[in-house]
Image: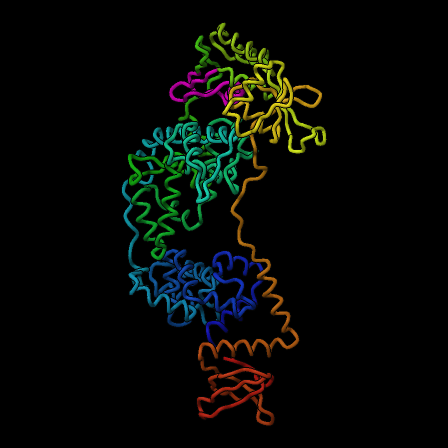
């Protein structure tokens, strides 16, 4: 019986959960052509599909496959043939290979499917290891100790990198809350966006992509068609302390690691070149995918202080990194927290309108201060600056001069200098000189008008009308003290705010309306797993369709497979008056409920009714 017959027979006996797992681990290149279990078996036995899954198997599982290519063998025999695995270890890996449709399991033991054996037999010519090499070559030596001084010495440097990355990610989320990042058609942030984000995060432009990737994987931002947006979880994350922020990033990093790569990481304390050498040993057929996957994970690990070292080629796990790889993110954060700079709760207000914090300001205080001040620098000390524009932004969000001054008074070690008091008071007095509102539907003779801009100062209206920076919103005068636009009032409001006008949004009754400039994705966009529900339903439907004569239909499909493979089969036929007889046949066609075949023993053509066939081997 051919591989297709054997595999199709076993596939149809699996439950949907087992088939779902198989299809997830071994995606089909042409799902549309799979109509029944024979088609599924044929797709899984395609050499390209087999080579793809062998790339994802570790050398111990590959050794079991290679040892089972000759004849059905039990786990003890396979273990003896391999020499480096126990019978229990062989059983575990062999059962996994059965689940992946690479081995068959019977009363006589495990055996590799013929198509799998053919691929493995060609490995030496492709420069890949055979059974002897899979079983005997030792893993690369590990330089240095797994734990001890080499780990503890790396902790301060690791914490410094972790703190820098965590704060840069926080700046990224803050920036996205104000201005979501646009995406280029070919992927990645547009160049102006990359520069803007890099400036806000105080990182080099190439590092923006890694931080965006971390933010998305952590659920803090969402990558949607057209760009990146913050999530509600990202905004809430900003209110947590640095060690909790780091814990969320590190846990998300760990969760996103493929199981194959995690098995590489957990076995090595020394990363860099040593990690890549071990990955190549453990996944000898992995090629580019394992190399790229390990490189990506290692790069993020260095960013997060999970590893540390003088260069990318020589990295070692930090104490927090070692704890994290055991699955204990809380313990990892506890190990990292004492090495982070302590949060401060008080600042120095300067006469030049700057605000100096002698360390990272507590997140709650930092976010409240940022509502009406700009962060200028974060190094040994954190520097913020007040300006008419920043204060106006705070007023637009619903703040008041009284609240701002009271907050500054509560955190200042130097009181409130007179220039600070004057700036906030003057900005509040001027706030609302320009008002923006929505034009109600049907209230204008021009159906395209959607918003208005008004001011009691005619010179201000004239200035707005001729300001070239406001050209994109198409303001036009409709009265002595009013302009209109075809854009929504939020668009007009933020255009005027960006142009540094003292603008306020208002309701139809003239009361002020608080606006926050942000668009958040309600749910992070997560890479969805392939949906196999329709395929599984079609497979079950095809099986049910032949339920009226399932045995005969199954025999016909087996014979079709034998014809395509030019396979000789042994057929047991019920002969009236003579009982069951065996024929060794080379099938040539199946139609009208009959089999046409050449009898290999008698060297004659035979035609047999499918209904008389008792067994097919």
Q: Position of residue 148 (x, y in %)?
A: 32, 35
Q: Is residue 177 left or right of residue 321?
A: right
Q: Residue placed farthest to the top in the image? A: 418
In-front residue for pair 129/361: 361
Residue drawn at (29%, 44%) of the image: 273
Q: Is residue 364 visible?
A: no
Q: Position of residue 362 (x, y in %)?
A: 49, 21
Count of numbered tags: 0
Asked if 179 appears above or below 534 in the picture, the reply is above
Q: Quadrant of residue 153?
A: top left
382 inside magenta stretch: yes
Q: Is residue 60 left or right of residue 453?
A: left
In-front residue for pair 71/470: 470
Q: Is residue 610 left or right of residue 332?
A: right
Q: Position of residue 12 (x, y in %)?
A: 56, 68
Residue drawn at (47%, 92%) of the image: 604
In-front residue for pair 121/517: 517
Q: Position of residue 562 (x, y in %)?
A: 48, 78
Q: Is residue 513 left or right of residue 335?
A: right
Q: Quadrant of residue 375?
A: top left
Q: Is residue 66 visible?
A: yes
Residue drawn at (53%, 33%) of the image: 234
599 inside magenta stretch: no
Residue drawn at (29%, 36%) of the image: 311
Specify the color scheme: rainbow
Q: Which portion, as a residue range, is magenta?
A: 357-386
């Amino acid at each position: 019986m051919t591989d297709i017959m054997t595999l199709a027979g076993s596939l149809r006996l699996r439950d949907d959960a087992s088939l779902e797992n198989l299809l997830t681990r071994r995606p089909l290149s042409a799902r549309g052509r799979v109509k029944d279990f024979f088609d599924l078996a044929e797709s899984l036995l395609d050499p390209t599909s087999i080579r793809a899954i062998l790339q994802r198997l570790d050398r111990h599982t590959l050794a079991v496959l290679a040892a089972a290519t000759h004849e059905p063998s039990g786990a003890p025999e396979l273990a003896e043939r391999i020499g480096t695995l126990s019978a229990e270890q062989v059983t575990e890996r062999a059962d996994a290979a059965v689940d992946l449709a690479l081995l068959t399991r019977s009363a006589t033991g495990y055996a590799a499917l013929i198509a799998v054996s053919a691929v493995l037999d060609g490995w030496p010519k492709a420069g890949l290891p055979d059974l002897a090499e899979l079983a005997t070559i030792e893993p690369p030596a590990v330089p240095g100790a797994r734990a001890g001084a080499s780990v503890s010495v790396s902790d301060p440097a690791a914490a410094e990198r972790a703190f820098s990355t965590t704060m840069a990610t926080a700046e990224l989320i803050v920036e996205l809350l104000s201005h979501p990042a646009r995406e280029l058609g070919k992927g990645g942030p547009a160049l102006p966006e990359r520069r803007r984000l890099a400036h806000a995060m105080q990182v080099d432009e190439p590092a923006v992509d890694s931080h965006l990737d971390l933010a998305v994987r952590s659920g803090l931002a969402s990558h949607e068609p057209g760009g990146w947006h913050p999530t509600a979880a990202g905004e809430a994350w900003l209110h947590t302390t640095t060690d909790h922020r780091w814990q969320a990033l590190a846990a998300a990093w760990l969760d996103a690691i493929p199981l194959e790569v995690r098995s590489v990481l957990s076995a090595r304390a020394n990363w860099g070149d040593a990690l890549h050498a071990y990955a190549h040993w453990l996944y000898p057929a992995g090629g580019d995918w394992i190399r790229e996957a390990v490189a990506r994970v290692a790069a993020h690990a260095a960013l997060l202080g999970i590893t540390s070292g003088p260069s990318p080629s020589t990295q070692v796990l930090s104490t927090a990194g070692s704890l994290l790889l055991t699955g204990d993110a809380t313990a990892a954060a506890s190990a990292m927290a004492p090495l982070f700079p302590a949060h401060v709760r008080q600042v120095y207000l300067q006469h030049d309108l700057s605000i100096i914090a002698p360390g990272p300001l507590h997140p709650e205080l930092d976010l409240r201060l940022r509502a009406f001040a700009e962060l200028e620098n974060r190094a040994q000390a954190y520097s913020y600056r007040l300006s008419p524009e920043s204060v106006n932004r705070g007023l637009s969000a619903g703040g008041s001069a009284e609240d701002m001054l009271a907050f500054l008074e509560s955190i200042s070690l130097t009181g409130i200098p007179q220039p600070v008091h004057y700036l906030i008071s003057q900005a509040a007095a001027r706030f609302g000189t320009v008002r923006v509102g929505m034009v109600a539907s049907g209230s204008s003779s021009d159906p395209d008008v959607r918003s208005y801009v008004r001011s009691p100062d005619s010179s201000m209206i004239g200035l707005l009308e001729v300001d070239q920076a406001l050209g994109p919103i198409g303001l036009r005068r409709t009265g002595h003290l009013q302009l209109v636009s075809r854009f929504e009032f939020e668009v007009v409001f933020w255009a005027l705010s960006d142009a540094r006008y003292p603008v306020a949004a208002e309701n139809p009754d003239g009361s002020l309306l608080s606006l926050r400039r942000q668009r958040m994705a309600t749910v992070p966009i997560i890479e969805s797993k392939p949906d196999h529900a329709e395929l599984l339903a079609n497979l079950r439907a095809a099986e049910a369709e032949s339920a009226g004569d399932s045995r005969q239909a199954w025999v016909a499909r087996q014979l079709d497979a034998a014809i395509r493979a030019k396979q000789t089969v042994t057929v047991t036929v019920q002969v009236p008056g003579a009982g069951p007889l065996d024929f060794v046949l080379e099938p040539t066609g199946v139609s009208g409920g009959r089999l046409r075949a050449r009898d290999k023993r008698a060297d004659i053509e035979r035609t047999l009714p499918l209904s008389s066939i008792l067994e097919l081997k």
